[in-house]
Amino acid sequence: MKSTELQKKCLMYFRRAYPKLKSRMIAIPSIGNRNALSRELQMIGMSAGVANLFLAVPRNGFAGAWILFKGKDRKNTKAQNTFRSEMIEAGYNFIKAINFEDFKAEVKAYLEAQINEGMVEQVVCRHLQVDPMLVHTKTSKQEIVRARQISCYFAQILTGKTDSAVSFQFFNSHCGGMHGRTTIKSLYASDTDFRNQIDLIMNELMISPKYMQI
């Protein structure tokens, strides 16, 4: 299915599935690389085709969500990656949908997802390549401790539970959670590689980067 056809199908589905939000999904016209307008945009440093839809609905600290249609085996262009990074940094979520069914699932997750501590932990451990079984052990290996700290902080944000309640689940103490939050915020501000890794985790969990501001 062509991008424009998929765009139209998704837009019509959204308006039927979420009638109260029907005016909140905005289609972004596709512009071919050889189009005169596309060339004009490139001349002033702008790029066409960086997103297909915009969902103007705030969720989990995000101001809204940009949606890009991209086949499973197709990589983002340089312009799309730049746009994605800038939008995440600005406080928006960025969703890449493979097909129509993927679009429906991603939009549903953005609008209706309920997440628990275990789900947060699984996502964090996958990105950090850490065995989730080790997070709740007494090991003090740095990579395990880091996964524990990140999981604890993000779980608190997403579940809405108190710092103390979530901290005891991961550290058996309130101080452990507080120290972990301070540590990851400090690393986020000073370590570029760590920041990029955290940005990917937050985007998947639909957490706005505003929570990393010190």
Image (spheres, grey):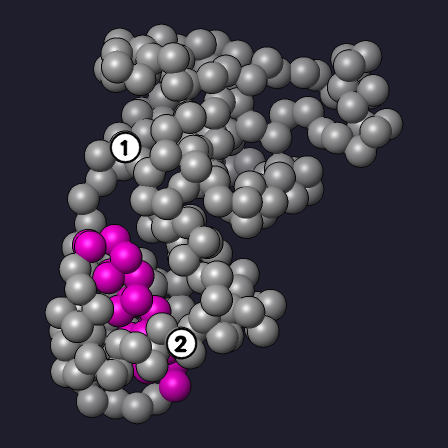
Task: Identify the secondary structure beneath mark 1.
Answer: helix
Which badge, 1 or 2, comes first in the chain's sequence? 1
Tell me which residue sits at (75%, 30%) in the image: 46
Front residue (pair 109, 19):
19
Q: Tell me how many marks there are.
A: 2
The answer to whether any part of residue 106 appears in the image is: no
Going by the picture, which residue comes out furthest to the right?
43
Kind of residue at badge 1: Leu
Give the residue pinned by disc 2.
Answer: 182
Give the residue pinned by disc 1.
Answer: 111
Dot 2, crowdedness within 10 Å: few (<14), some or many (≥20)? some
Tell me which residue sits at (33%, 81%) in the image: 179
Residue 93 colored magenta? no
Magenta segment, which residues? 142-160
Residue 148 colored magenta? yes
Query: Does residue 164 sit above or below 199 in this rendering?
Result: below
